[in-house]
Image: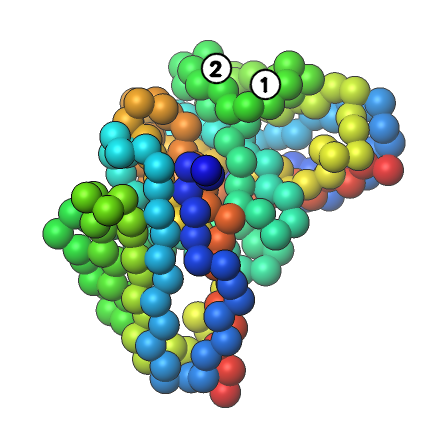
Amino acid sequence: DAGVTQSPTHLIKTRGQQVTLRCSPKSGHDTVSWYQQALGQGPQFIFQYYEEEERQRGNFPDRFSGHQYPNYSSELNVNALLLGDSALYLCASSLGKVNEKLFFGSGTQLSVL
Amino acid sequence: RKEVEQDPGPFNVPEGATVAFNCTYSNSASQSFFWYRQDCRKEPKLLMSVYSSGNEDGRFTAQLNRASQYISLLIRDSKLSDSATYLCVVNPLTGGFKTIFGAGTRLFVKA
């Protein structure tokens, strides 16, 4: 049973560039949430996708956008990167309408120079 | 005030000790509660759900006090392998699908 997979594992970008992170949910899961985790902090909710729609968004600017495909996989796009975007980006999958137990991928460590 | 606040760490305890973590949440309409464990540079993993009646899983006991809006996690007979960051997690009913994580409490168990 495949768990949540994320790619790439590490990424280095420069300010102003754009980045795309990818996530495949756990088998049988249809909901994908994205989180940003800065060093020493808890994960911060970016947004959640269900049925290919963004159904809730956290306090992140429009530079952060996403997509969900019919096979439930998802992408997180960040435009005009800032130094402060350096963080671990985590994808979590869950099942259905009720936001219960989350299963996380191992994350993408993004460094913006 | 933060939506979810946890005890500041780190907690340094010897093997075999009992340690307790507390967490408070601000939204009284919060619906469900969890503790996650996160090892250094790894992803968070679900440790246990927290039920109103309290629940136990081996050496771990979770309690919920809705009136005071706090959640606790008790670890008995600490093992070296319990060293990790423990994250308090809340699903607010009115917040929809936005799961909120605390900043985490770091635990070091020493031999």
Q: Which mark is residue A66?
A: 1
At 48% across and 70% down in the image, what residue appears? B11
Quarter holding residue A62: top right
Whether residue A3 is visible to the viewer of this picture, yes or no, is: no
Q: Is residue B47 left or right of residue A105?
A: left
Q: State how far apart marks 1 and 2 are (Cα).
A: 8 Å
The numbered mark 1 sits on a residue in which chain? A
Q: Residues within 10 Å of mark 1 (few under 14, many from 20)?
A: many
Amino acid type at mark 1: Gly
Q: Which mark is residue A54?
A: 2
Amino acid type at mark 2: Glu
Q: Is residue B34 left or right of residue A18?
A: left
Whether residue B53 is visible to the viewer of this picture, yes or no, is: yes
Disc 1 to disc 2: CB gap under 8 Å: yes
Q: SS at mark 2?
A: strand
Name the residue furthest top. A53
Q: Which mark is residue A9?
A: none
Pick whichever, B31 or B44, lies toward us: B31
Sequence order check: which comes first, mark 1 or mark 2?
A: 2
Pick whichever, B23 or A74, lies toward us: B23
Q: Is residue B16 left or right of residue A36?
A: left
In the image, is residue A23 above or below residue A57? below
- Respond whether the residues carrying marks 1 and 2 are from the same subunit: yes
At 50% across and 59% down in the image, what residue appears? B8
At 20% across and 62% down in the image, what residue appears? B56
Residue B88 pos. (x, y %): 39, 49
At 41% across and 42% down in the image, what residue appears? B4
Name the residue furthest front. B1
Residue B29 pos. (x, y %): 25, 30
